[in-house]
């Protein structure tokens, strides 16, 4: 193994890690806000990818250009899911944790079924996008343009999220609701509205991730499964309740995946990620940056 | 509480029992069971299989002017013109569900035979079940070499298994080597499922026998979000030939990642699967100019045997795409099975089994480039040579073996 | 037996009801002769037992595991490896599988039981997934090819039967009854009391002298042992196993679902849940799955969602609450 190959692996791992972070960001936001793990996260991603694909087919819109539209559509979708499903799951009188898991898990199955009904189970992909197939070469290291763009979108999304959370009234309301949902009602913040907006925002982030992935990944009803477990591990590794934990954890997961694939047969590369998670939480039971 | 539980169990049982015989064999028809994945990640394969089988059923049931067994007659003359009907069941890629569905088809739908199942793991349990009930199982499109080595009497496979497929791939390499091409090193790229493992095992064995060196053997997790590290290994191996065994999803990601990391293999010789699917070429076809895949089927055959084109048109009218490696095998499996049932003049399992063992269909009465259909003692047809196809322009051209080829291979592939 | 103690009375009644149910179910094959329906019955009983086992750790002790496929797979693989490689009868294989699974559960639990909430849930998923990947790559155990169990005719010694479902049916019934009985015995034992205390509030329990860590370990080992018996049974029943079909994440969810539907942490919940869920899913697939349009997924998903939202305390929980209310 040459240094060149190692450098290439780490660079690819870093790019992929930023994308993992972006995929996990929405999940982390929703969890941080209201302690709900969205077990339909993979299906949210699938929906966003179909949306990007649909805009490409209908209006020849490149995924990079359609990303804001996909995010907007997913925002509405996320808010609807909160108002139509999650709201009731959160007010469950018993076993709230299990109810949330299985309500969102059931929702995910329905979404997969609907995708199969509407789009058939055939494999789709966007054959020609602006960046598809293009590569930037730096010192002999190949940086694929779609992943590079994805990494930049990821950085921008996390930056914007930081601004929203720390610099806006909405962000302060989010933070306050997270810390004490009961008390905010006293100061006139509508908890349900904040939660609906939070779900919208979380889904919009998934929308960005979906549009980015549509540039280089294939699309079919079960595509979410490829990413969802990694997203859960990323969020938990970063620490539930910390959006920036997810960012850091995403990068770490990408790098560890690349490193494991160098050291072990690639079919075992996820064992490295799983081991990383276990080691971290055994040493530090609230993840890297968790607030628990 | 007591009533509730008892009622629930009883109601469920009654519900299940009430469907018993509901769809039992009608007087004027012969029912065949088809067990395929209809939901889940391989659902498209199941839907395509359904179209292929329905095309074959239409040819058997109606009068069609084709050189296929039973085409020019209506229904099954051996059974007084009875029509064929196929009942479909979904196994979702799960061996347990496949087994249960096969049992349901055999006991409730009274099917005369079962056809399936795409996933080799499911074909393993379904063929076991069929054996126990004495119902013939026609393995349409599972290519695991171990399937016919289990001493089953009711197992039949008209199409090649992975060792035969891999052998054809190495025959091509040998012939190219003889013509002066430098082919020394191979790279295997295979997924961690039964299909990938079988394929890689066969290829590893053949490479050793015929003096090729495997410089990278990359086994990867199916449906990974990223194949960067894997492609990195392939690239550093820089083998003369890349031999992928991947389904459509990973195939698309593999080709894209190779392109992005600037890896241009000198040649690709693929173990079909994803590399015979239209979806893959729609996505990355322009990066695969000159790629070779093995196949059971070639549309080029239509030039020598016009009937192949007609069958393809019939299939296309249903499915909106050309017949491919899988669908051709599913189509032929039903034709061969129907021929057996017709000659058995009975829907009894043992009679059909006896008739199938006596099957002898000449190659030009199939849509395949085969010599003939004739089963050995294990139920395997050994006269079904695969072909090798090269992707040129926007279609596949048969390049091997010579008697089926219509063009010389382009070697190495264009980059 | 004092009639004055309503708790004891209820306990005795439960046992009587269970025995009557078992007797009635045991007579079902007299009516249900169809093989497919019998197959559904076997699966229903098996999932009732598996869910009951899951319920011990996740329901009673409150440690939600979505990685029970690991123990199921351990049971299946130990049974079949011993059977196919060493000719050990599946009866011993299942017991050995149970012990192996209990050992794994203890080894996994040792570091993981300090984790709380979703950290623990994700840890169980991740460990099971790692086990799945290792089995996919372990050539001795057949790797992805799995193990094809040779079936050479009906035999109780080898616990394999060509066509008859009845032996499997009675085994599954006994298995479900044993799992139920274990839960019944534990409910009012010291362990049961400790587990509920750990579930409600581990810190408070600790201060009251409950050995929280030991409680969790015991619950995990027992739960894993029973689950692995189910795995061994399943392997014999299907006579073919591969990592995909016995160790995938789906399985972990399928084991939890009946208990969630019927009522988590209740004695009757898993059985009631399985009796509704398994026949429904089987029938949905058999009659809607062939279409290839995804209707079976939509129906199944709506069902799971509706159950979780509509009956958060489970059917048994809702019923017993109503009964308490009408009694009051």
Image (spheres, coloured by chain):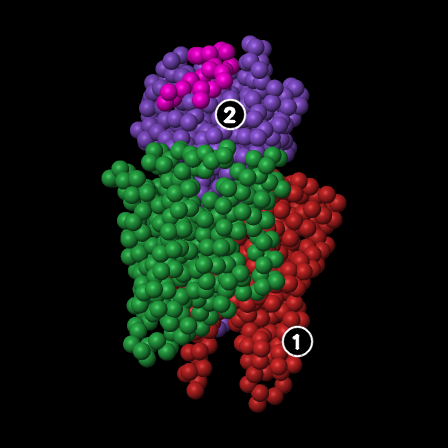
The x and y percentages for residue B95 are: 54, 44
- In the image as oriented, which residue stretches furthest toward the top? B179
Tell me what hue chain A is rendered in.
Answer: green
> Taken as a whole, is the magenta stretch helix, strand or loop?
loop
The chain containing the residue under callout 1 comes to: C
The x and y percentages for residue C154 are: 66, 46
The x and y percentages for residue C128 are: 58, 54
Residue B402: within the magenta?
yes
Name the residue: 63% across, 74% down: C212
State the mark number for residue B265. 2
Along the line of sight, which residue is nearer the eye, B399 or B48? B399
* Quarter of the image where the N terminus of chain C is located: bottom right
Task: Give the structural element (helix, strand or loop) at label 1.
Answer: loop
Q: Is residue B143 above or below residue A51?
A: above
Chain that appears red: C
The x and y percentages for residue C299 are: 37, 54
Chain that appears purple: B
Same chain for mark 1 and mark 2? The answer is no
Q: Is residue A57 above or below residue A101?
A: above
- In the image as oriented, which residue stretches furthest toward the front? A139
The span picked out in magenta is B391-415
Residue under pointer 1? C211
Which image quadrant for residue C105? bottom right
Name the residue: 54% across, 42% down: A10
Q: Is residue C309 above or below residue B323?
A: below
State the mark number for residue A281. none
């Amino acid at each position: 193994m040459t240094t060149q190959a190692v450098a290439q692996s780490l660079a690819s791992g870093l790019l992929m890690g930023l994308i993992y972070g972006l995929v996990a960001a929405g999940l982390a936001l929703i969890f941080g806000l209201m302690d709900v793990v969205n077990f339909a996260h993979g299906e949210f991603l699938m929906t966003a990818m179909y949306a990007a694909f649909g805009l490409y087919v209908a209006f020849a819109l490149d995924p990079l250009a359609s990303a804001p539209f996909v995010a907007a559509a997913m925002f509405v979708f996320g808010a609807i899911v909160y108002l139509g499903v999650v709201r009731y799951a959160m007010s469950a009188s018993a076993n709230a944790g299990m109810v949330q898991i299985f309500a969102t898990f059931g929702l995910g199955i329905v979404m997969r079924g609907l995708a199969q009904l509407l789009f058939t189970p055939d494999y789709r992909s966007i054959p020609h996008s602006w960046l598809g197939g293009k590569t930037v070469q730096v010192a002999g290291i190949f940086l694929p343009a779609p992943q590079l763009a994805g990494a930049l979108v990821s950085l921008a999304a996390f930056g914007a999220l930081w601004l929203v959370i720390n610099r806006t009234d909405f962000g302060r309301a989010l933070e306050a609701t997270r810390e004490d949902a009961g008390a905010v009602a006293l100061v006139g913040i509508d908890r349900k509205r904040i939660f609906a907006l939070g779900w919208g925002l979380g889904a919009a982030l998934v929308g960005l991730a979906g549009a980015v992935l549509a540039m280089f990944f294939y699309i079919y009803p079960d595509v979410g499964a490829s990413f969802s477990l990694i997203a859960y591990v990323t969020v938990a590794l970063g620490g539930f309740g910390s959006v920036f934990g997810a960012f850091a954890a995403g990068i770490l997961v990408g790098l560890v995946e690349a490193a494991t694939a160098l050291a072990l047969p690639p079919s075992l590369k996820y064992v490295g990620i799983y081991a990383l998670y276990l080691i971290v939480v055994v040493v530090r039971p609230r993840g890297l940056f968790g607030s628990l | 509480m007591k009533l509730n539980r008892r009622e629930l169990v009883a109601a469920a049982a009654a519900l299940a029992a009430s469907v018993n015989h509901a769809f039992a064999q009608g007087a004027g028809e012969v029912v065949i069971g088809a067990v395929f994945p209809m939901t889940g990640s391989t659902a498209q394969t199941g839907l395509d299989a359904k179209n292929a089988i329905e095309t074959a059923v239409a040819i058997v049931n109606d009068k069609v002017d084709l050189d296929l067994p039973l085409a020019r007659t209506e229904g099954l003359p051996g059974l007084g013109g009875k029509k064929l009907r196929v009942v479909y069941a979904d196994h979702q890629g799960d061996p347990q569900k496949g087994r249960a569905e096969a049992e349901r088809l055999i006991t409730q739908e009274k099917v005369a035979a079962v056809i399936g199942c795409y996933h080799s793991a499911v074909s393993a349990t379904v063929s076991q079940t069929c054996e126990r009930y004495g119902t013939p199982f026609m393995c349409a499109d599972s290519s695991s070499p171990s399937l016919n080595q289990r001493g089953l009497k009711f197992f039949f496979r008209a199409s090649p298994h992975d060792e035969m497929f891999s052998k054809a791939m190495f025959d091509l390499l040998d012939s190219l080597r003889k013509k002066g091409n430098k082919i020394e090193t191979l790279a295997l790229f295979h997924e961690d499922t039964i299909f990938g493992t079988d394929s890689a095992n066969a290829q590893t064995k053949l490479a050793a026998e015929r003096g090729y060196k495997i410089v990278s053997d990359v086994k990867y997790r199916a449906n990974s979000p990223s194949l960067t590290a894997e492609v990195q290994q392939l690239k550093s191996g820089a083998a003369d030939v890349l031999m992928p065994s991947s389904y459509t999803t990973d195939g698309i990601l593999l080709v894209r990642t190779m392109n992005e990391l600037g890896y241009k293999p000198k040649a690709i010789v693929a173990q079909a699967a994803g590399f015979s699917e239209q979806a893959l070429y729609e996505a990355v076809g322009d990066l695969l100019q000159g790629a070779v895949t093995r196949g059971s089927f070639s549309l080029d055959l239509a030039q020598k045997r016009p009937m192949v084109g007609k069958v393809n048109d019939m299939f296309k009218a249903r499915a909106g795409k050309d017949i491919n490696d899988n669908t051709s095998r599913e189509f032929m499996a039903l034709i061969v099975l129907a021929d057996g049932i017709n000659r058995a003049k009975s829907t009894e399992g043992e009679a059909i089994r006896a008739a199938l063992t006596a099957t002898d269909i000449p190659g030009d009465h199939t849509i395949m480039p085969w010599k003939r259909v004739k089963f050995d003692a294990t139920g395997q047809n050994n006269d079904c040579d695969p072909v090798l196809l090269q992707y040129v322009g926007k279609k596949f051209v048969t390049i091997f073996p010579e008697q089926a080829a219509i063009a010389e291979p382009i070697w190495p592939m264009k980059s | 037996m004092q009639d004055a103690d309503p708790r004891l009375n209820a306990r005795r009644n439960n046992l009587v009801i269970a025995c009557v149910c078992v007797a009635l179910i045991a007579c079902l094959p007299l009516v249900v002769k169809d093989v497919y329906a019998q197959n559904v019955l076997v699966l229903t009983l098996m999932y009732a037992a598996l869910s009951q086992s899951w319920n011990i750790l996740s329901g009673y002790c409150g440690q939600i595991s979505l990685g029970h496929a690991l123990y199921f797979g351990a049971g299946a693989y130990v049974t079949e490896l011993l059977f196919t490689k060493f000719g050990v009868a599946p009866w011993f294989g299942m017991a050995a599988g149970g012990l192996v699974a209990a050992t794994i559960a203890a080894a996994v639990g040792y570091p993981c039981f300090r984790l709380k909430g979703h950290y623990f849930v994700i840890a169980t998923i991740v460990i099971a997934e790692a086990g799945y990947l290792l089995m996919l790559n372990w050539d001795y155990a057949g790797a992805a090819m799995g193990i094809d169990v040779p079936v050479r005719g009906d035999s109780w010694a080898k616990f394999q039967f060509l066509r008859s479902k009845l032996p499997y049916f009675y085994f599954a019934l006994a298995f479900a009854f044993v799992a139920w009985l274990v839960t019944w015995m534990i409910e009012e034992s010291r362990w049961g009391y400790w587990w509920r205390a750990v579930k409600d509030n581990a810190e408070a329990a600790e201060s009251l002298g409950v050995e929280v860590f030991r409680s969790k370990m015991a619950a995990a080992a027992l739960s894993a042992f029973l689950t692995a018996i189910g795995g061994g049974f399943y392997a014999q029943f299907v006579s073919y196993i591969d990592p995909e079909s016995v160790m995938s994440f789906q399985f972990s969810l399928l084991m939890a679902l009946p208990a969630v539907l019927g009522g988590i942490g209740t004695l009757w919940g898993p059985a009631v849940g399985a009796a509704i869920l398994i026949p429904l899913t089987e029938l949905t697939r058999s009659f809607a799955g062939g279409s290839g349009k995804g209707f079976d997924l939509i129906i199944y998903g709506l069902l799971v969602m509706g159950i979780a939202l509509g009956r958060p305390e489970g059917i048994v929980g809702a019923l017993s609450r109503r009964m308490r209310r009408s009694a009051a």
